Image (cartoon, rainbow, N blue to C red):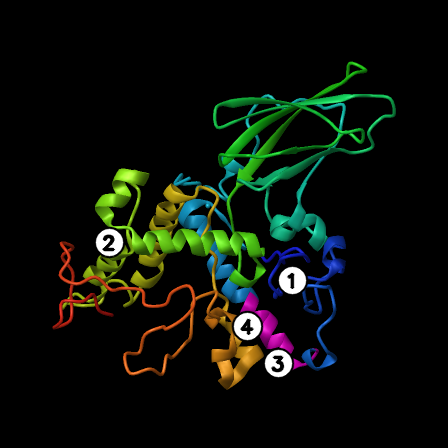
Amino acid sequence: DLLRGSNEGTMPAYGARDTAAAAGVPATSYQGAEGDNVPPTLQTNSSTRRVFSAVALSAVALAGAAFASGRVSGGASGVSLLDAYSHSDAVPPPGEITNEHSLFVSNELERNNGFRIGQGYLPWVHLAEVYVPTLMQVEEPKENVTYTWEMTTAGEFNSFEADGDGSVEMLFKEPGWHTVKLGGSDGSKSTFSVMSKYVRREVRNMTHGALEKFLDTLQTVYRTSQADGEKMYGPKFRSIERLVSEHLRGAADKECDHWHDDAGVLTHHVAYTLEMEQSLQTVEPAVTIPYWDYTIDAYEYSTNWTESPIFNDEWFGTASPDNPDHVLEKGRWAYTEVTKGALETSPRNPYGLLRSP
């Protein structure tokens, strides 16, 4: 999914289609957060190359996310969601009837961007994002008719009295199929099947709030030991030391690099990303792991790639610290410690520190 963030409180967006995309017209330009078209200089062969590279990278991200967990890749409670494209998942469960109403489902990002999650390529008619407020609207509501909505999610039954236009906002707390019932004071009734999915987005396409929540949760994983994390958050918690050690055991094996040579890079890292994402969700169930489309940085900054917002102090910090200790001195990740002599069995450097493979 290449949804742009909302115009308010959102990072500048890349890879977003213009409003014509909502009408099914192929995208020919990129837009900034305010919808302004990028200068005509991008309408060149280099722009075409950028489009193809972004599409290719996004396809890899989408495939990885789908095969690992069924998440819709953009931008996931520790629950595996697979079957993003399986037949059984694409077809609503039995029982949906011919309805007396038409339903429109959207969230704020979709409404601001002018197109839906997946931009029409996904098989579900009614699609909601887990833990994101979702507006349920009756298309062409009748005058003087009061509408009541019912929805069950995470084992909780919820009843909603609609606004005057027949709309109501719901929050889906679990991935998978949900039954939403709609009744009118005129006796009309409808039952809809709504699919709920987590969404992974390019990091710059996240809202400011979503990005902050992700980074705050990631810091918890960095600063909490495995033993303490399991006590506080449960058995699916993984500390960063545990995750790095796991990576090193496969990637720094003296026999060979099991995680990067040949087919290992895709299979291992898709599962590894899911494991880390599920760890984050033990702390904050609304979080998903974003992906980084570095072709954007290659295009926008060329050899000055360190100017990318990825390396802002508020995000991940300076690309190449120039102090004698080669550590971050300011920002969110300043002086992040590396464990020494821990119980995890994995390759370490002569000082007992976790090392790169």
Would you say 95 lies left or right of 278 here?
A: right
120 in magenta: no
For the N terminus, the image quarter is bottom right
What's the amino acid at mark 1? Answer: Ala
How far across and how far down the image is residue 143, in percent? 87, 25
Q: CA distance from mark 4 to mark 1?
A: 12 Å
For label 2, the residue is 242
Q: Which of the marked residues, 4 or 3, is nearer the chain's N terminus?
A: 3
Of the numbered discs 1 and 2, the one sitting upstream in the chain is: 1
Residue that mark 4 sits on: 296
Foreground residue among 11 and 74: 11
Residue at horizontal 62 percent and vertical 59 percent from the top: 10
Residue segment shown in magenta? 43-54
Point out the frontmost of discs 2 and 3. 2
Q: Which residue is mark 3?
A: 46
Can you identify the residue that label 1 sits on?
16
**Judging from the image, what secondary structure is the residue with disc 2 in?**
helix
- The residue located at (83%, 21%) in the rendering is 145
Name the amino acid type tagged 3. Answer: Ser
Residue that lies at the very extreme toward the bottom in this rendered image:
303
Question: Spatial distance from mark 1 to mark 3, Cα to Cα?
Answer: 17 Å
Dot 1 alpha-carbon crowd within 10 angstroms: few under 14, some 14 to 19, many 20 or more: many
Q: Quadrant of residue 341?
A: bottom left
Q: What residue is shown at x 23% (from left), y 56% (from top)?
A: 246
Which secondary structure lies at badge 1? loop
Query: Would you call the spot at circle 2 few (<14 residues within 10 Å), some (14-19), or many (20 or more)?
Result: many
Q: For the image shown, how many numbered marks are present on the structure?
A: 4
Disc 4/disc 3 C-alpha distance (Å):
12 Å
Name the residue at the right extreme. Answer: 143
